[in-house]
Image (cartoon, helix red, strand yellow):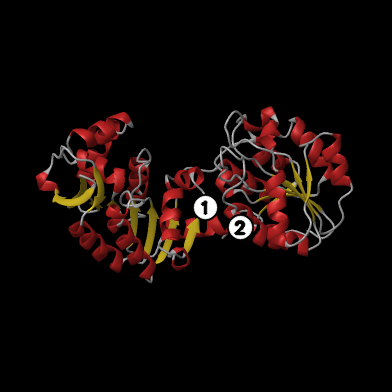
Amino acid sequence: MATYLTLDDVKAKDKVVLLRVDFNSPVDPESKKVIDDARIRAHGETTIKELTEKGAKVVILAHQGRKGDSDFIPLKQHAEILSKVLGKPVKYMDDVFGEKAKDAIKNLKSGEILVLENVRTYAAETKEGTPEEHAKTELVKNLAPLANLFVNDAFAAAHRAHVSIIGFTTVLQSAAGRIMERELKSLNRVLENPEKPCVFILGGAKADDSLEISKYVLNNRIADYILTGGVVGHVFLAAKGFDLGKPNTDFLEKKELMGLVPGIKELMQKYPDKIKTPKDLAVEVNGKRKEISVGELPIDHPIFDVGAKTVEDYVKVIRNAKSIVVSGPMGVFENSEFIFGTKRIFEEIANSKAFSLAGGGHTIAALQEFGLSNKISYVSTAGGALIEFLMGKKLPGVVALEKAATRKT
């Protein structure tokens, strides 16, 4: 049961709706052009389209990049892309809450859309705080009086207690947009009451969160099995006492991942049958793939994939699953020599009748490359927010919407 309001619970016709979306997109560092419009398209085809069709005056707040980074650019392009997605004009104002922005909002007609400037050009935007503190900021004090409703559709930024994410929720009726609602429903499906057996597949190069996620989903009886691959698999093998060989151990030390080993060791002692690590690995020898069993470790070659026996072992678990969460590939799938593990495991998930949820940049890229995205029940575009949710953390953006729903409007 949703503990926040959705677009079904609010009236939008002729209302000024402040809509926080996540338009943050990959940008070419040289040309400063947006090179992937997936997030803009996702918001455009759902929440924005629905609000304009309902006759709302839609005012869009979004960020792009971080101050000082090469992808910190204005939102003019984003407005143009959105216009193409919707097949209708979209206004853009190079101002966040000054007189120009306020006049543009006052002149909006029902069904029209206005994209305001990158909210991170406002220095205080990224300062963490409470909704009550943020309600006193210039951003909220200038824009809230012009609006009737706040809609947060930026799940991917919901783990940040930033001004435009939580500041409006204490002063305006607030609801979740369709992307936010869809993400939360899908995540709750695998975290609150997953169909069993529930399998978590943790891979990829970012292993920092793997211990905390594993601990949370095992201690709370969410996951029945955890399958490890990629760099995550290497750390878990190291925790089992395997010496991976100099190039691989050096890599883990450089990434400061060896500090996870004691905690993983403890977790594996507590759940000896629930955490699976690779039985064999693929290493690079003279640019070619060579498979070795873990018994042949240590090895002086870099490990770039799991081997055939591991895939066989993992496939058996996946075929039995009713819920599957996958975050991260099994190896360096970008190299055709080491595509095998990721491709086979992802194909198995795609062909499964289980409810499957996939997230993380490399996971999505691999699914797209293999043409499997539409065979996954839900693909999450969120990065940090998804990881924090999987670790059982409360997301400030979601908490603020839940609090707002309890207020009498």
Name the element at disc 1.
loop
Q: Nearer the viewer, residue 336 or 276?
A: 336
| Residue bearing the label numbered 1 | 381
Say which mark, if any, is on residue 42. Answer: 2
Q: Would you place residue 148 above or below residue 264 in this image?
A: below
Q: Nearer the viewer, residue 276 or 309?
A: 309
Q: Residue at 44% x, 54% y: name it.
A: 365
- Residue 272 in view in this figure: no
Q: Is residue 306 left or right of residue 73?
A: left
Contact? badges 2 and 1 (CB < 8 Å) = yes
Q: Would you place residue 14 above or below residue 155 in this image?
A: below
| Picture quadrant where residue 356 is located | bottom left
Residue 60 appears at what percent x and percent y? 73, 47
Q: Identity of the amino acid at label 1? A: Thr
| Picture quadrant where residue 308 is located | bottom left
Residue neighbourhood size for the residue with mark 1, other residues' Cα within 10 Å, grouped as few (<14), some (14–19), many (≥20): many
Residue 363 appears at what percent x and percent y? 41, 53
| Picture quadrant where residue 8 is located | bottom right
Q: Residue at 34% x, 55% y: name it.
A: 200
Residue neighbourhood size for the residue with mark 2, other residues' Cα within 10 Å, grouped as few (<14), some (14–19), many (≥20): some
